[in-house]
Amino acid sequence: MTSVIALRDERAAGIVGSSTDGSAEGTPPATTPVPAYVLNVSRPIQSWRWTTALLVPFELLAVAWIVPLAILLVMMPVGLALAVVVWIGRTIFR
């Protein structure tokens, strides 16, 4: 019984036996391409450390504040330049 199981495992691995695809004996069968939507679940997902779980809210808060600060940094000089142009225009044409 053990030899039948070993032979079956060797055939499944492509080590021994006649192959139906015409490849040489002892070579593994050709692998088929895997579609992009198929996920590899052969290894477990690493668990999070507790320090990482504590830092996630602060990282989200930092990301949430970056966008308004970037807009402020870009729009502040534009607004100041526009205010100066309007002020100069009002003083000249008064």
Image (cartoon, helix red, strand yellow):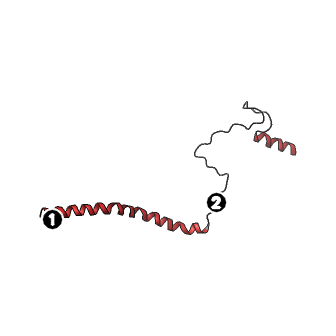
Rendered location of residue 52, percent (x, y): 58, 66
Q: Amino acid at mark 1?
A: Thr
Mark closer to the observer (1, 2): 1
Question: Mark 2, residues whose alpha carbon is within 10 Å: few (<14), some, or many (≥20)?
Answer: few
Answer left or right for 88 relative to 80. Answer: left
Which residue is pictured at 15% across the width and 65% down the height? 91
Rendered location of residue 79, percent (x, y): 28, 62
Disc sitting over residue 69 in the figure? none
Quarter of the C terminus within the rendering: bottom left
Residue lying at the far left of the rendered structure: 94
Rendered location of residue 12, percent (x, y): 76, 41
Quarter of the N terminus within the rendering: top right
Closest to the observer: 56 or 8?
56
Residue lying at the far top of the rendered structure: 22
In contact (CB < 8 Å): disc 1 and disc 2 = no
Helix or strand or loop: what does disc 2 sit on? loop
The image shows residue 30, relative to residue 50, as above or below, that is: above
- Which residue position holds label 2? 46
Q: Label 1 to label 2, Cα distance in Å?
A: 66 Å
Rendered location of residue 82, percent (x, y): 25, 61
Helix or strand or loop: what does disc 1 sit on? helix
The image shows residue 34, relative to residue 71, as above or below, that is: above
Which residue is pictured at 56% across the width and 69% down the height? 54
First-in-chain label (1 vs 2):
2
Closest to the observer: 46 or 69?
69
Quarter location, residue 81? bottom left
- Which residue position holds label 1? 91
Q: Amino acid at mark 2?
A: Gln
Quarter location, residue 50? bottom right
Answer left or right for 12 relative to 58. Answer: right
Answer left or right for 71 relative to 23. Answer: left
